[in-house]
Amino acid sequence: MMVHSEGGAAIARNNHKNSDKRRRILDAAVSVFAEKGFFQSKVSEIARMAGVADGTIYLYFKNKDDLLISIFEEKMQEINISFRKALEEEKGARSRFRKLIHMHLAGFQAYPELAAVLQVELRQSSRFMRGYKKVELKNYLDLIGEVIEQGQEEGVFRPDIPLGLAKRLVFGTLDEVVSTWVLAGRPYDLETLADPIVDLFLKGIQQDPRGERTETERP
């Protein structure tokens, strides 16, 4: 019984060690890809930053493309888990929608290197753009869709807008806003755009027929 217990503990320690090493490699890859670009980055540079031998990376990832796509899937999985948990604390659809927009922009604001990789470098991978099934991206779109659908059921969002169109419109807007911020050199606070984006989606661009200004328009 003691042998089995010690063996299980050793396996657990080894799994934790492997998990930690994989995490270090992924984080190092984010930094190197963001600084030098996907095509200019070398596996040896990633290994050096992660504190592992060059060959160790190939124990976890097939090649540089696989490493880039793994960054996307694993970071998006973390985002999906944390966002779902945070949204559970919000009650109505309006509140959940606002929370989602703020979290999306605040997350990239806090981790600009990841923003550069996901918004710019990831699109350099032909494998990702053409033949890869973006599972976690679909999960994120579904999360947006759930919030919108809740709003339609509550009667606060228009029920005549197709759900598929609405969730892609929201994601596409956020994606473009973050991409513009990255390519411009991050010259402004990204999260300050959250409330105007929410206001735009909830009220549209049509002028109030009474000629009244919204809160965001008042001086």
Image (cartoon, rainbow, N blue to C red):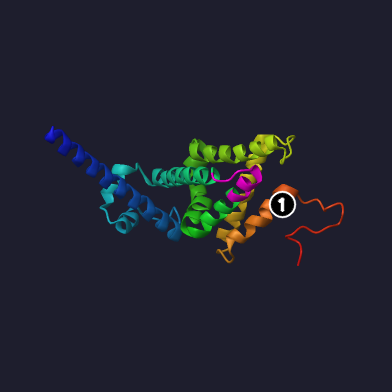
The front one of 17 and 69 is 17
Helix, strand or loop at label 1? It is helix
Whether 216 is drawn above or below 83: the answer is: below
Tag 1: Cα neighbours inside 10 Å, few (<14), some, or many (≥20)? Answer: few
Percent from the top left, x then y, of residue 134? Answer: 50, 38
State the count of labels: 1
In the rendered view, does 19 fall on the left or right side of 143?
left
Furthest-right residue in view?
Answer: 210
What segment is highlighted magenta in the picture?
89-99
Taking the spot 52% from the left edge, 55% from the top edge, the residue there is 108
Figure quadrant of residue 33:
bottom left
Residue type indicated by callout 1: Leu
Towards the viewer: 124 or 61: 61
Q: Is residue 138 left or right of residue 20?
A: right
Question: Is residue 27 on the magenta stretch?
Answer: no
The image shows residue 210 at horizontal and vertical percentages of: 87, 54
Q: Where is residue 82 drawn, in percent x and y?
A: 48, 46
Residue ID for mark 1:
200
Q: Main secondary structure of the magenta part?
A: helix
Residue appearing at x 15%, y 33% in the figure:
4
The answer to whether residue 198 is left or right of residue 125 is right
